Image (cartoon, helix red, strand yellow):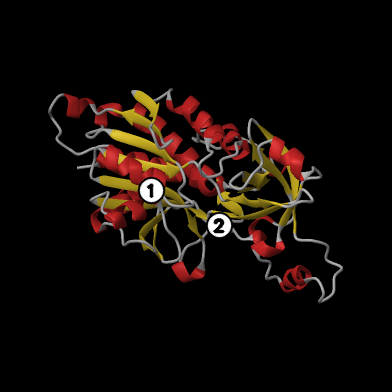
Amino acid sequence: MEKPANGIGNRLLEDLLMARGPGGQENEVRAVCHAELVKHCDGVWTDAAGNLIGLIRSPLRDSGISSLESMRIMAHLDEIAMIVKRVEPNGTLRVVALGGANPANFGMCPVDIMAEGASLPGVLSFGSMHATGESPQGNDVQTGAVKWQDVHVITRLSAEALIRAGVRPGTRVVLSRHWRAPWRVNDAIAAHFLDDRAPVAATLEAAALVASRKQELRCDAYFVFTTMEEESNAGAMYAARTLPGNVTVAVEVGPVLDEYGTELRVDPIVSTGDLKAYYTRGVAEQLQRAAERCGYAPQVALLLDFASDASAVLASGASAQAGCLAIPTENTHGYEVVLVDGITACARTLAQYLVDAE
């Protein structure tokens, strides 16, 4: 993959995509982010909830010139995945969704079973298709209505061997690294888990841009890479309660759909609300102005069948104000597609928003 103009580089995005990060087990993604954050931040640490945090301090605030509250920028480390419900006597695994996944999001494909200390290979299966009405899952597959009860993971190991390896109810199952490499489609990149790896890449790029303009920064900026967004927003809730600041901005993918008036183009999406909350009007307007200052035509949208860390902490009262900036994305929660320059557009807008904060 080529390096985009003025971007942080596709090597980083590829490293993020190849890193496996089911909710509650995001160590591989966290390590990639940590290596990048330490280049630009005044302090980097992992909190008790597993959130990775990078802090860029404002020299103006330290000097007493600015009294602005700190800003919290959140992108999530985790991905949609599966979790073992039970180990069958024949060594197959029954799994259910971890996060907002349907079987159709993955298809029949290679998986990694995240056992204790190592991963084991498996295959996600819907069963053989040459079936009659005697096989219920065959009917479900033929009609396109595959349910988790129709799904199993083939391991070719005995139940006893799986138990010895530490596979049990609660073990995470993810798409194999064999299935994760990004695919270049002219000016776009396609891959599983661009939600939230593309926004993570944009947030890391924004941290680099803010560090280069640190003398303009009037507030401390906390770049928070959260855990378990797809399941419960637990990481964001903890970070919002324990970090200073009244404003939380989530960096996300944004669905490209006619009903929202959004298109697959470079211009970032500024969300005004979603399933969990309507965002703070002032924050949305500031994000819109920041995008315009960078030369973009922001896509303002109300994303009703959507949610983010920021809307979760706003709805819970853990953050006084919140907003959401998103990269336009086709096939959200599937084989996702974003424009290469859309990642940098999001990063530039986010950095401009932070240095413009008043």
Label 1 sits on what residue type? Ala
Compared with residue 205, is residue 75 higher up or lower down, i.e. above or below?
below
Q: Going by the image, does 50 lie left or right of 184?
A: left
Circle 2 residues within 10 Å: few <14, some 14–19, many ≥20: some
In terms of depth relative to the viewer, which is nearer, 159 or 202?
A: 159
Q: Mark 1: which secondary structure? A: strand
What is the spatial separation of the Cα atoms under label 2 and label 1, in whole angstroms?
16 Å
Judging by the rendered image, the residue that carries numbered circle 2 is 332
Q: Going by the image, does 185 lie left or right of 333?
A: right
Q: Position of residue 345 (x, y in %)?
A: 44, 45
Label 2 sits on what residue type? Thr
Q: Quadrant of residue 335?
A: bottom right
Circle 1 residues within 10 Å: few <14, some 14–19, many ≥20: many
The answer to whether one can see residue 190 in this image is no
The answer to whether one can see residue 305 in this image is yes
Looking at the rendered image, the quarter that the C terminus falls into is top left
In terms of depth relative to the viewer, which is nearer, 75 or 141?
A: 141
Judging by the rendered image, the residue that carries numbered circle 1 is 250
Count of residue discs:
2
Q: Tell which residue pokes out farthest to the right in this image.
A: 130
Compared with residue 189, is residue 277 higher up or lower down, i.e. above or below?
below
Q: Quadrant of residue 58?
A: top left
